[in-house]
Image: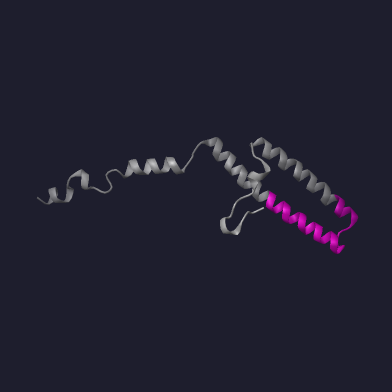
Amino acid sequence: MKDKILAGPESLDPFGTMDERLTSSLTRRVNADPESVERGLAQLVLTIIELLRQLMERQALHRMEQGTLTDEEIERLGETFMKLDRRMRELTEHFGLEEGDLNLNLGPLGDLL
Protein backbone atom coordinates (compact mmCIF):
# COMPACT_ATOMS: atom_id res chain seq x y z
CA MET A 1 0.00 0.00 0.00
CA LYS A 2 2.78 2.45 0.92
CA ASP A 3 4.56 1.82 -2.39
CA LYS A 4 1.46 2.73 -4.34
CA ILE A 5 0.90 5.95 -2.41
CA LEU A 6 4.52 7.12 -2.65
CA ALA A 7 4.94 6.22 -6.28
CA GLY A 8 1.71 7.70 -7.50
CA PRO A 9 0.84 8.11 -11.15
CA GLU A 10 3.45 9.64 -13.44
CA SER A 11 1.24 12.60 -14.29
CA LEU A 12 1.53 13.87 -10.70
CA ASP A 13 5.34 13.75 -10.71
CA PRO A 14 6.44 17.42 -11.03
CA PHE A 15 9.89 16.33 -12.20
CA GLY A 16 8.66 13.82 -14.78
CA THR A 17 9.13 16.12 -17.77
CA MET A 18 12.08 18.06 -16.33
CA ASP A 19 14.52 16.66 -18.89
CA GLU A 20 12.38 17.84 -21.81
CA ARG A 21 11.84 21.31 -20.33
CA LEU A 22 15.49 21.70 -19.39
CA THR A 23 16.70 20.65 -22.82
CA SER A 24 14.25 22.99 -24.52
CA SER A 25 15.20 25.87 -22.26
CA LEU A 26 18.93 25.36 -22.72
CA THR A 27 18.74 25.13 -26.49
CA ARG A 28 16.84 28.42 -26.56
CA ARG A 29 19.30 30.20 -24.25
CA VAL A 30 22.67 28.64 -25.02
CA ASN A 31 24.04 28.71 -28.52
CA ALA A 32 26.89 26.23 -28.36
CA ASP A 33 27.91 26.71 -31.98
CA PRO A 34 31.74 26.76 -31.84
CA GLU A 35 31.95 29.55 -34.40
CA SER A 36 29.63 31.89 -32.50
CA VAL A 37 31.34 31.06 -29.19
CA GLU A 38 34.72 31.94 -30.72
CA ARG A 39 33.35 35.17 -32.18
CA GLY A 40 31.70 36.12 -28.87
CA LEU A 41 34.90 35.48 -26.95
CA ALA A 42 36.90 37.49 -29.48
CA GLN A 43 34.36 40.31 -29.19
CA LEU A 44 34.71 40.36 -25.39
CA VAL A 45 38.52 40.28 -25.45
CA LEU A 46 38.75 42.97 -28.13
CA THR A 47 36.28 45.14 -26.20
CA ILE A 48 38.49 44.95 -23.12
CA ILE A 49 41.59 45.73 -25.18
CA GLU A 50 39.83 48.71 -26.79
CA LEU A 51 38.77 50.02 -23.39
CA LEU A 52 42.34 49.74 -22.09
CA ARG A 53 43.69 51.37 -25.25
CA GLN A 54 41.39 54.35 -24.81
CA LEU A 55 42.37 54.71 -21.15
CA MET A 56 46.07 54.52 -22.00
CA GLU A 57 45.65 57.06 -24.79
CA ARG A 58 43.89 59.50 -22.46
CA GLN A 59 46.63 59.04 -19.88
CA ALA A 60 49.29 59.68 -22.54
CA LEU A 61 47.51 62.86 -23.70
CA HIS A 62 47.25 64.04 -20.11
CA ARG A 63 50.96 63.43 -19.56
CA MET A 64 51.78 65.26 -22.80
CA GLU A 65 49.74 68.27 -21.68
CA GLN A 66 51.52 68.22 -18.32
CA GLY A 67 54.89 68.10 -20.07
CA THR A 68 56.05 64.94 -18.28
CA LEU A 69 56.95 63.04 -21.48
CA THR A 70 60.07 63.47 -23.55
CA ASP A 71 59.87 63.84 -27.32
CA GLU A 72 61.22 60.30 -27.66
CA GLU A 73 58.51 58.92 -25.35
CA ILE A 74 55.81 60.78 -27.27
CA GLU A 75 57.12 59.37 -30.55
CA ARG A 76 57.23 55.84 -29.13
CA LEU A 77 53.72 56.11 -27.71
CA GLY A 78 52.36 57.41 -31.00
CA GLU A 79 53.94 54.53 -32.91
CA THR A 80 52.65 52.01 -30.36
CA PHE A 81 49.09 53.33 -30.58
CA MET A 82 49.20 53.25 -34.38
CA LYS A 83 50.39 49.62 -34.37
CA LEU A 84 47.74 48.66 -31.84
CA ASP A 85 45.05 50.37 -33.92
CA ARG A 86 46.19 48.52 -37.05
CA ARG A 87 46.22 45.16 -35.23
CA MET A 88 42.78 45.79 -33.74
CA ARG A 89 41.38 46.47 -37.22
CA GLU A 90 42.95 43.22 -38.48
CA LEU A 91 41.46 41.20 -35.62
CA THR A 92 37.99 42.73 -35.88
CA GLU A 93 38.02 41.99 -39.61
CA HIS A 94 39.25 38.43 -39.01
CA PHE A 95 36.38 37.71 -36.60
CA GLY A 96 33.78 39.52 -38.73
CA LEU A 97 33.27 42.32 -36.23
CA GLU A 98 32.82 46.02 -36.72
CA GLU A 99 34.02 48.85 -34.50
CA GLY A 100 30.50 49.28 -33.12
CA ASP A 101 30.43 45.63 -32.02
CA LEU A 102 33.09 46.43 -29.43
CA ASN A 103 30.81 48.82 -27.58
CA LEU A 104 28.78 47.08 -24.88
CA ASN A 105 25.49 48.49 -23.64
CA LEU A 106 25.55 48.54 -19.84
CA GLY A 107 21.84 49.25 -19.45
CA PRO A 108 21.19 52.22 -17.17
CA LEU A 109 24.89 53.09 -17.14
CA GLY A 110 24.90 53.62 -20.90
CA ASP A 111 27.44 52.43 -23.42
CA LEU A 112 30.86 51.22 -22.30
CA LEU A 113 32.87 53.01 -25.00
Q: Main secondary structure of the magenta part?
A: helix
Q: Quadrant of residue 59?
A: bottom right
Residue 67 vs 39, above or below: the answer is below
> Which region is colored magenta?
50-75
Q: Is residue 59 magenta?
A: yes
- In this view, the residue in front, 72 or 27, is 27
Residue for point 71% across, 42% down = 88
Instruction: List x then y, in percent, for residue 43.
Output: 62, 44
Instruction: List x then y, in percent, for residue 93.
Output: 68, 36
- In this view, the residue in front, 110 or 94, is 110
Residue for point 21% across, 44% down = 11
Q: Quadrant of residue 71?
A: bottom right
Residue for point 57% across, 59% down = 108
Q: Is residue 37 magenta?
A: no
In the image, taking residue 4 as reference, residue 17 lies left or right, namely: right
- In this view, the residue in front, 16 or 110, is 110
Q: Residue furthest bottom?
A: 66
